[in-house]
C-alpha cells in the first residue's frame, strides 16, 4: 500500500480479468509485478477484502507532460516559461473557480463569460506583456468571444436545444443540489470555452504579424496595414477552421462511429442533439475566427498608425 491508512502494509486484492459491457465480454490486463494499481475496500473489518479498480496511469502521463514542458522551455526559453505559467493559471481558473461555481449554483452563463475574459487578459499579458499588439489582440479576442456567446444563445433558443447529449449530461440532473444544473447553460459554456483557444490564437497571430509589418515599413498607412491584415487572416482561416473541425471530430469519434454504424437514416442521424451540438460548436468556432480576423486587423491598423511609429511600451 503506497497511500491511505494502511500505507506500508501488504494486502491481497482480487482482480476480475473478464467483465461485461452490454452483451460483450471484455478482458482487462492482468496485473504484473511492478504495476501500480488502484484498489478499494469492499469487505468488512472482520472480513477485509480488497478489489482491483484500475491501473494507475497518471505517473506515465506525468512523465510525458514533464518531457513536453522541458522541450517547451528549451525551444521557447523565457516565452516557454511564460506559456507554462499561463496554462497553469487557466487550468486553475477552470478547476478552482468555474467548476466549483457551477456546483455551488452560481449562474453558469456569467461564470463562463468571466472565465473566458480572465483567460484572454491573463494569457496575453503573461505571454506578451504590456504592448500595443497585446492590447489589439485582447480587444479582438474579447469582441469575438462576445459575438460567439451571443450567437450560441441565439442558436440554442432557435433550435430548442435541451443540453441532454449523453449519459453524463443526464447524470448531472441527478445531483442533489438546491438549484438544478442547467444543461443548456452547460452547452453554452462548452461552445464558448471550446472556441476560446482558437480565438486567442487567431487574434494574436494577426496582431503580431501586423506589428512586424508596421515595424519593417516606413510608409505603411491604415489602408495598407488593414489590407495586409486581411490577407494574413485569409491564409490563417483555412488551417484554423480545419484545426477546429478536426479537433471536434477527434473528440467525438467514438460517438460518430456508433451513430454511423447504427444503420439509421441520415435525417435521424443529423438531427440527434449530440450531433447537432458538435456541429453547432464547430460552426460557431469557425464564425468566431471569421469575426476575429477583420476586427483585430481593423483595431491593429488604427492603433499601429496612431501618431506614427511611436514606442509601443
Image (cartoon, rainbow, N blue to C red):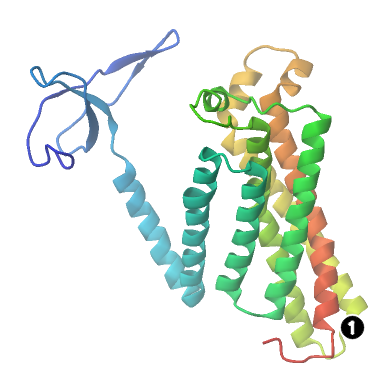
Query: Image quadrant for the C terminus?
Result: bottom right
Left or right, residue 242 beside residue 294: left
Furthest residue toward top:
23
Q: Residue furthest right?
A: 223
Q: Residue at x 72, y 68 (%)?
A: 137
120 over 219 or under it: above or below: above
**Helix, strand or loop at mark 1:** loop
The quarter in which the N terminus is drawn is top left
* Residue 252 sits in quarter: top right
Q: Position of residue 275 (x, y in %)?
A: 69, 27
Q: Seen from this angle, which residue lies furthest front? A: 178
Task: Relative to 17, say whether 144 is above or below.
Answer: below
The residue shown at (87%, 72%) is 226
Asked if one can make out residue 246 in the rendered structure from this viewpoint, the answer is no
Q: Position of residue 308 (x, y in %)?
A: 83, 91
The image quarter in which residue 164 lies = top right
Q: Is residue 307 above or below residue 263?
A: below
* Residue at screen point 66% across, 61% down: 201
Quadrant assignment, res 280: top right
Image-based side of 146 in relation to 111, left or right:
right
Instruction: Residue 211 in the image: state x and y as whole percent.
Output: 74, 79
Circle 1 sits on which residue? 221
x, y percent for residue 176? 48, 26
State the residue at coordinates (63%, 32%): 182
**Of 207 and 235, which appears nearest the observer?**
207
Amino acid at each position: 500500500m503506497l497511500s491511505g491508512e494502511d500505507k506500508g502494509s501488504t494486502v491481497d486484492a482480487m482482480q476480475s480479468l473478464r467483465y461485461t459491457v452490454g452483451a460483450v465480454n471484455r478482458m482487462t490486463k492482468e496485473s504484473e509485478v511492478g504495476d501500480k494499481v488502484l484498489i478499494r475496500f469492499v469487505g468488512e473489518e472482520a472480513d477485509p477484502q480488497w478489489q482491483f479498480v484500475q491501473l494507475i496511469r497518471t505517473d506515465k502521463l506525468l512523465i510525458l507532460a514533464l518531457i513536453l514542458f522541458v522541450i517547451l522551455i528549451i525551444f521557447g526559453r523565457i516565452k516557454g516559461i511564460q506559456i507554462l505559467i499561463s496554462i497553469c493559471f487557466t487550468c486553475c481558473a477552470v478547476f478552482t473557480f468555474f467548476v466549483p461555481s457551477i456546483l455551488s449554483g452560481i449562474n453558469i452563463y456569467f461564470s463562463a463569460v468571466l472565465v473566458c475574459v480572465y483567460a484572454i487578459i491573463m494569457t496575453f499579458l503573461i505571454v506578451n506583456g504590456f504592448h500595443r499588439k497585446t492590447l489589439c489582440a485582447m480587444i479582438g479576442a474579447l469582441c469575438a468571444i462576445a459575438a460567439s456567446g451571443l450567437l450560441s444563445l441565439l442558436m440554442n433558443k432557435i433550435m430548442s436545444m435541451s443540453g441532454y447529449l449523453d449519459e453524463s449530461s443526464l447524470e448531472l440532473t441527478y445531483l442533489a443540489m438546491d438549484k438544478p444544473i442547467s444543461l443548456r447553460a452547460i452547452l453554452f459554456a462548452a461552445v464558448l470555452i471550446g472556441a476560446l483557444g482558437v480565438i486567442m490564437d487567431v487574434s494574436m497571430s494577426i496582431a503580431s504579424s501586423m506589428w512586424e509589418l508596421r515595424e519593417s515599413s516606413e510608409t505603411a498607412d491604415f489602408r495598407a496595414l488593414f489590407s495586409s491584415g486581411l490577407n494574413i487572416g485569409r491564409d490563417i482561416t483555412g488551417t484554423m477552421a480545419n484545426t477546429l473541425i478536426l479537433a471536434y471530430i477527434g473528440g467525438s469519434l467514438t460517438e460518430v462511429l456508433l451513430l454511423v454504424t447504427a444503420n439509421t437514416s441520415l435525417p435521424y442521424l443529423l438531427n440527434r442533439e449530440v450531433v447537432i451540438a458538435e456541429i453547432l460548436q464547430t460552426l460557431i468556432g469557425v464564425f468566431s475566427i471569421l469575426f476575429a480576423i477583420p476586427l483585430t486587423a481593423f483595431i491593429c491598423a488604427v492603433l499601429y498608425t496612431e501618431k506614427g511609429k511611436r514606442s509601443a511600451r
